[in-house]
Amino acid sequence: MNTQNQPKLAAFPPSAETVKRAHVTADDYAQMYAASVSDPETFWADQGKRVDWMTPFTKVKNTSFEPGNIDIRWFEDGTLNVSANCIDRHLETRADQTAIIWEPDDPSKEDAQHITYRDLHASVCKMANVLKELGVEKGDRVVIYLPMIPEAAYAMLACARIGAIHSIVFAGFSPDALGARINGCDAKVVITADHAPRGGRETPLKSNTDAALLHCKDSVKCLVVKRTGGQTTWTDRDYDCNALMADASAECAPAEMNAEDPLFILYTSGSTGQPKGVVHTSGGYLVYASMTHEIVFDYQDGDVFWCTADVGWVTGHSYIVYGPLANGATTIMFEGVPTFPDAGRFWEVCAKHKVNQFYTAPTAIRALMGAGNEWVEKHDLSDLRLLGSVGEPINPEAWNWYNEVVGKGKCPIVDTFWQTETGGHMLTPLPGATTLKPGAAQQPFFGVQPVVLEPTSGEVVEGNGVEGVLCIAGSWPGQMRTVWGDHERFEKTYFSDYKGYYFSGDGCRRDEDGDYWITGRVDDVINVSGHRMGTAEVESALVAHAKVAESAVVGYPHDVKGQGIYAYVTLMNGEEPSDELRKELETWVRTEIGPIAKPDLIQWAPGLPKTRSGKIMRRILRKIAEDDFGALGDTSTLADPSVVDDLIENRMNRR
Ligand code: WT7
């Protein structure tokens, strides 16, 4: 595909000041990037030094994308402990420096907490000892279902300290989703809290956990952190985290782990089936998280870094906890939401803690842009030096607002493209090196070799001004290693459509200058407010309802969320559509998966467009959802083409 006729867009070269301060200039980038791909062994052997090893590695890279033998190992004979790298090694020089600034949901009720590296060490050791008391050993799995409170970071690092593998489940997920993840990795312990305050409301995490555990082995133990002090039930399997930590020793020797021992599992949605457990290991992941955090955000000693994500997503793993703490940074952990108590909350927190780097998602930027500039202007943002964006393409309007109103035209914006699977940034501008283009993820990070493939033939598309699917040739240290318990699914999902490459699932354009623009998912994954959702998951939740015969879910453009969830629903014979039933289905999906999966629009569909072999033609459903009836394409292969007319005619019955 040729895209030569794209209009020339505004471009923003880095200011002299930014270049002067930056870790990497344009010349550095060119030279370092070339070195990183021509001789990855030497490049990554050098970068491997950012981590303290117990036994130094002698092997750097041992990776294969060959069909039948997908095998990814980095620094494979080195040993280390991730928690010691994030805490202990800083104690000599920065014990009294703040490691984590915790900012509560409601600033009128509670103050922020400043947790030093010394405090962090004590709390993590205590929690590690508590986990040991509960019988958790090296290699065991621990599920974490917590609000954004310091204990979430303690729990992650405590697992890392004793070699247990954590799997965080976002506190917005339902009991069913939690139960499936506890069972999916056969966890020994689940760590939760009484309640999770967020945006002035409370989610009953403990009772959600109780409901989830009804479907789990009796042996699973539940460690409960007191957050609100609100009432909860108490059973034989429950342990009081605060009481146990108070009695536990503040010393716990870090376990010696192999570089390739799993650090965490994180479930994420795919185009088919139920979410899969993405496995990240210890050495390569930490090297990559640390390097990207330092270079992409131009993190310098003494800076205050704020990533607004939740630790329930990979962004929180890599850029609230592991990357920043490995670098001895001060990182903010924010319990709240952008619009509570008012739409100035982000900027109030930036001013209060003198934030230097601020990293958020386009959906939040769009929502705050809609709230008006006065919310930004009343706070002092003069310490801001860099802005980041992640999770979905950022539209130029939102980019410009972020640049002008938040950054006052002086903060470079890094639009970082990456995925749960990639562990860290893949395509991104570098603040001191890149002339920014609003909406483009631009350049590969060191060691990352993007290739554009023709979607059907799989042939490599060379040159600039081209479009296709985005694949990556060769491995990078932060890459996921397998799908928990299902290596075959790992190969099938990422390495089978385009042999010899890692397939991202995204489409992209490489413009005339060689800059990359992500054009969105090419599979049945949708991106709702920066949250990834498999349409198959929402469909299977809907058809689990007794009145639903069939359902097809697609994404459609949504002003704030980026994409909304559009569900076509065919009811069982004899069932009548009604507003009441629509609400019932919305609530049903919320309870089956969680609030983020609630359909934005439901259209009653007496029939769905299917091929003669019974395959639903989603292309047509997407077009109808987009109100793009002129572009339905060929419908002649449908078993019953009249279904389409009916869907178009009834598109108004949605809400
Ligand atoms: C999908 C990954 C790890 C980041 C948080 C989301 C989309 C992510 C960008 C960006 C355009 C982006 C892609 C990707 N995406 N960042 N800067 N520009 N699209 O992680 O839940 O694993 O989702 O988010 O479609 O495949 P995730």
Image (cartoon, helix red, strand yellow):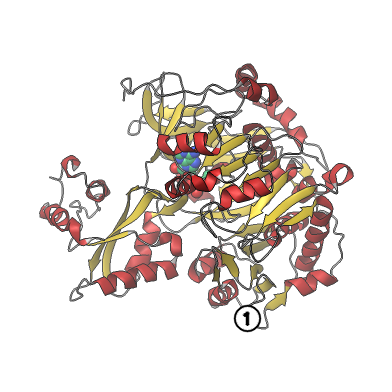
Q: With respect to residue 213, does 19 lie above or below?
A: above
The C terminus - image quarter? bottom left
Q: Is mark 1 within 8 Å of ligand 1?
A: no
Q: Position of residue 453 (x, y in %)?
A: 40, 29
**Residue 607: image x %, image y %?**
18, 61
Q: The N terminus lies in which quarter of the figure?
A: top left
Viewer-nearest residue: 326 or 216: 326
Give whichever of 338, 637 is nearer the camera: 338
Residue drawn at x 75%, y 69% is 135
User: Image point 38% across, 61% down: which residue?
Assistant: 538
- Which residue is nearer to you in this view: 266 or 438? 438
Q: Which residue is mark 1?
A: 231
Left-right relation of 110 to 208: right
Count the numbered circles shown: 1
Please provide percent x and percent y for residue 584. Answer: 33, 73
Decide: few, some or many residues near mark 1? Use Cα within 10 Å; few <14, some 14-19, many ≥20.
few
Expressed as whole percent of the image width and height from the top left, the position of residue 487 reads 54, 50
Residue 479 visible in the shown view: yes
Relative to 212, say whether 377 is above or below: above
Up/down of 85 relative to 209, above or below = above
Q: Amino acid at mark 1?
A: Gln
Whether 237 is drawn above or below 405: the answer is: below
Mark yes or no: residue 260 visible: no
Assign a secondary structure to mark 1: loop
At horizontal 63% and vertical 39% (from top left) the residue drawn is 357
